């Protein structure tokens, strides 16, 4: 067999994952560690790391003394019906003629390419090979010190030693989930609706409980009644400008949920991906209500939303009692976060470029938001469910004469991508809701896209009549 030389564990992971999906039968014996070491000419630690991640992600399971097997009873392949939705979610199914009201990332024209290039060259010239090798698993100390100062703006007061840098929010979430699964604490609460990339990570490894998201957060009286009867280990929240609803929790509820976490002994994962994008006034984090010495909030913040996806960095701030365990799990899953990208982020912050870019981006987004809300408000057949004050998304209820699937398919035929609401529910129930994103399209595209949306609604209304 011809040897294949791979120089990164992620390449090996993707190669084996695709082989499992496309060629292997469920329950069949997988390659041995020795076979993979020989086939890919990699060291045993890299192979073990990849196999453990495939097991964690549900592609393999291990039998003691017998090796790894393709996971049984797992729906590995993606249905043909689901593929277009997955592609639309990140705008990958967009051609030059299509209007993307589905994507959750800024238009590539907003990416500060020249600045990124300049700072990358600056970092390489100054530090040379130092940034290209293995880094401190916790993250560059210099960056962590700057981030500790930076998040004081959010009334979060911590030591830099409390911060762990990861290769993005999703990896931070994987680390947290694995940490709790390893100690057999697997019951997690999430909002309904919620972000599918997050709850899909939880499926199969956590016992998920859902709680209806009201206009200002969960009904915490009902939630406390639940806690008196059942145990929760974790909850996952996006308390500011939630995806897909745009909802922001009230100050009162933010404070109380942290108090309930201490009272009933559970931890809160706060995914703070949108709080920078406020269009009226600054919003508070759950972490700012945490009590020193009695911490309950696991805080995650991404920097990819502000700058661009390729930056691929996030930070975690954990209660001290969890920090060492989290660091160990990170080491097992992804022990090297790019030193070069960390140094670029450091430069972006210390030279003020991050704040400058955010100011310009928010100004553009606010203009898009106002135009989208104005035009959508003129369509009598729909209901805008949340009066958002920030973020990227508008949550809309459709009239009864058209389903979300019918609307999204018809809009797609006419060159407009929109996401159906059922994607954001754990059971994918029919909701007659859609999510409009205004972050990617231009103002002109927003106008044309909403005009097409209106025409589709009028067409189905005439059929109903």
Image (cartoon, rainbow, N blue to C red):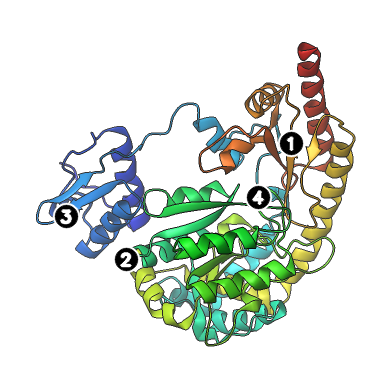
Indicate the quadrant where residue 73 lies. top left
**To which residue does mark 1 refer?**
397
**To which residue does mark 3 refer?**
33
Residue at 53 percent across and 76 percent down: it is 262
Residue at 74 percent across and 70 percent down: it is 355
Marks 1/4: CA–CA distance:
23 Å
Which one is earlier in the sequence, the residue at label 1 or at label 4? 4
Marks 2/4: CA–CA distance:
33 Å
Marks 3/4: CA–CA distance:
39 Å
Residue at 84 percent across and 35 percent down: it is 447
Marks 2/1: CA–CA distance:
40 Å
Q: Are marks 3 and 1 in contact (CB under 8 Å)?
A: no
**To which residue does mark 2 refer?**
182
Q: Are marks 2 and 1 in contact (CB under 8 Å)?
A: no
- Secondary structure of residue under mark 1: strand
Residue at 75 percent across and 64 percent down: it is 358
Which one is earlier in the sequence, the residue at label 2 or at label 1? 2
Of badges 3 and 1, nearer the viewer stands 1
Q: Are marks 2 and 3 in contact (CB under 8 Å)?
A: no
- Secondary structure of residue under mark 3: helix
Q: Quadrant of the N terminus?
A: top left
**To which residue does mark 4 refer?**
105
Q: Are marks 2 and 4 in contact (CB under 8 Å)?
A: no
Residue 440 location (% of width, % of height):
72, 45
Indicate the quadrant where residue 225 lies. bottom right
- The residue lying toward the viewer, choosing from 448 and 325, is 325
Marks 3/1: CA–CA distance:
52 Å
């Amino acid at each position: 067999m011809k040897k294949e030389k791979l120089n990164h564990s992620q390449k090996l992971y993707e190669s084996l994952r695709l082989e499992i999906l496309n060629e292997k039968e469920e329950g069949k014996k997988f390659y041995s560690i020795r076979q993979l070491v020989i086939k890919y000419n990699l060291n045993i630690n890299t192979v073990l790391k990849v196999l453990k991640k495939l097991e964690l992600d549900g592609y393999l399971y291990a039998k003691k003394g017998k090796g790894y097997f393709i996971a049984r009873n797992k729906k590995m392949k993606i249905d043909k019906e689901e593929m277009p939705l997955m592609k639309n979610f990140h705008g990958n199914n967009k051609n030059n003629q299509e209007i993307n009201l589905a994507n959750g990332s800024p238009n590539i024209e907003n990416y500060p390419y020249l600045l990124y290039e300049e700072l990358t060259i600056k970092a390489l010239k100054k530090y040379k090979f130092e940034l290209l090798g293995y880094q401190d698993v916790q993250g560059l100390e210099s960056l962590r010190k700057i981030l500790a100062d930076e998040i004081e703006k959010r009334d979060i007061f911590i030591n830099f030693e409390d911060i762990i840098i990861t290769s993005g929010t999703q990896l931070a979430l994987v680390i947290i989930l694995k940490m709790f699964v390893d100690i057999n604490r697997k019951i997690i609460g999430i909002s309904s609706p919620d972000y599918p990339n997050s709850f899909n990570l939880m499926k199969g490894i956590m016992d998920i409980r859902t709680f209806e998201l009201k206009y200002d957060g969960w009904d915490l009286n009902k939630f406390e009644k639940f806690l008196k009867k059942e145990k929760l280990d974790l909850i996952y929240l996006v308390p500011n400008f939630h995806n897909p609803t745009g909802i922001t929790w009230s100050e009162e509820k933010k404070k109380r949920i942290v108090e309930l976490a201490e009272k009933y002994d559970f931890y809160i994962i706060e995914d703070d991906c949108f709080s920078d994008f406020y269009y009226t006034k600054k919003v508070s984090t759950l972490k700012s209500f945490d009590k020193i010495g009695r911490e309950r909030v696991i805080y995650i913040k991404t920097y990819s939303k502000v700058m661009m996806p390729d930056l691929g960095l996030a930070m975690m701030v954990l209660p001290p009692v969890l920090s060492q365990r989290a660091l160990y799990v990170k080491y097992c899953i992804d022990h090297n976060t790019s030193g070069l990208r960390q140094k670029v982020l450091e430069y972006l912050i210390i030279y003020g470029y991050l704040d400058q870019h955010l100011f310009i981006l928010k100004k553009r987004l606010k203009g898009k938001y106002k135009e989208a809300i104005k035009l959508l408000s003129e369509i009598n057949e729909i209901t805008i469910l949340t009066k958002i004050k920030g973020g990227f998304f508008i949550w809309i209820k459709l009239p009864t004469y058209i389903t979300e699937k019918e609307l999204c398919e018809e809009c797609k035929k006419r060159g407009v991508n929109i996401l159906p609401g059922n994607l954001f529910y754990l059971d994918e129930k029919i909701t007659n809701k859609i999510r409009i994103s205004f972050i990617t399209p231009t103002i002109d595209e927003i106008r044309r896209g909403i005009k097409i949306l209106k025409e589709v609604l009028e067409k189905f209304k005439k059929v109903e009549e």
